[in-house]
Image: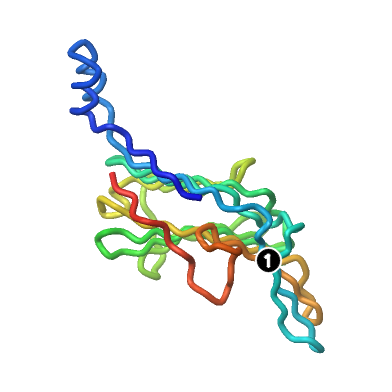
């Protein structure tokens, strides 16, 4: 379920609130907010073994990595993406957010954790049109509830509107004989699918 919250623009807000609050209202920045509640219990689990090959099914009892909410807020100052998950504790995990801008750029914000990696801890990668990208003020971090991305508008080329997609995957078992992993795509009904590109939201404009 997706809902939109459009904040009043400063001039309109000032007119509604009256002259006494003109200064405070004018100082506020306008923003467009999209809130999407992804149904719980829709993780697609893929299992592989040599005898049966690949098998895919929705596992209603699997909490890892089940996305439940995506909140996108776009203002003239920054883009903020907040996602909630029931759990993200697999052997390996990867959380990724895709941002497509009105100027034709694609940004990928990725956070992955691998227990077999030589360097412990999460690896964070930001790409712009497929190339490594860095910019002052970019933030990709995990919280108790899920993940957060914050990107100053200047880092996104001052694009006035964006579309956002979020996908998460977790590996439960990987031994070459009985591999098993799960996916969830926030904007796809019925869970995720690692064979398809991430599903994008509607436009969110400042």
Query: Closest to the observer: 24 or 111?
Result: 24
Residue 133 in picture, x, y percent from top left? 39, 61
- How many marks can you see? 1
Residue 107 in picture, x, y percent from top left? 39, 61
In the figure, residue 54 lies in which quadrant? bottom right
Does residue 159 appear to the left or right of 65 in the view shown? left
Q: How is the image coloured?
A: rainbow
- 81 lies above or below 94: above
Query: Closest to the observer: 54 or 105?
Result: 54
At mark 1, the secondary structure is: strand
Query: Closest to the observer: 41 or 164?
Result: 41
* Residue placed furthest toward the top: 20
Does residue 3 appear to the left or right of 192 in the view shown? left
* Residue placed furthest toward the bottom: 51
**Residue at figure coordinates x 27%, y 65% from the top left:** 104
**Residue at figure coordinates x 74%, y 86% from the top left:** 53
Residue named by callout 1:
182
Q: Residues within 10 Å of mark 1 (few under 14, many from 20)?
A: many
Query: Closest to the observer: 55 or 110?
Result: 55
Residue 64 in picture, x, y percent from top left? 70, 56
In the figure, residue 117 lies in which quadrant? bottom right
**Residue at figure coordinates x 54%, y 48% from the top left:** 37
Quadrant of the image containing the C terminus: top left
- 32 lies above or below 113: above
Residue 151 in picture, x, y percent from top left? 38, 47
**Residue at figure coordinates x 49%, y 60% from the top left:** 125
């Amino acid at each position: 379920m997706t809902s939109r919250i459009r904040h009043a623009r400063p001039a309109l807000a000032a007119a509604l609130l009256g002259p006494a609050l003109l200064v405070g209202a004018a100082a506020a920045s306008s923003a467009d907010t999209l809130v999407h509640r992804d149904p719980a219990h829709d993780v697609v689990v893929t299992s592989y073994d040599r005898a049966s090959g690949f098998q895919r099914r929705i596992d209603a009892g699997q909490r890892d990595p089940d996305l439940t909410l995506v909140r996108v807020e776009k203002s003239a100052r920054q883009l903020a993406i907040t996602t909630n998950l029931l759990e993200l504790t697999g052997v390996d995990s990867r959380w990724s957010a895709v941002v497509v801008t009105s100027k034709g750029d694609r940004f990928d914000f990725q956070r992955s954790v691998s227990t077999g990696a030589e360097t412990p801890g999460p690896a964070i990668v930001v790409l712009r049109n497929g190339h490594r990208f860095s910019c002052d003020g970019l933030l990709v971090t995990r919280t108790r509830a899920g993940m957060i991305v914050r990107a100053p508008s200047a880092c996104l080329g001052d694009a006035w509107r964006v579309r956002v997609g979020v996908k998460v995957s977790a590996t439960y078992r990987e031994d070459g004989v009985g591999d098993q992993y799960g996916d969830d795509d926030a904007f796809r009904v019925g869970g995720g699918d690692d064979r398809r590109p991430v599903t994008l939201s509607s436009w969110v404009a400042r």
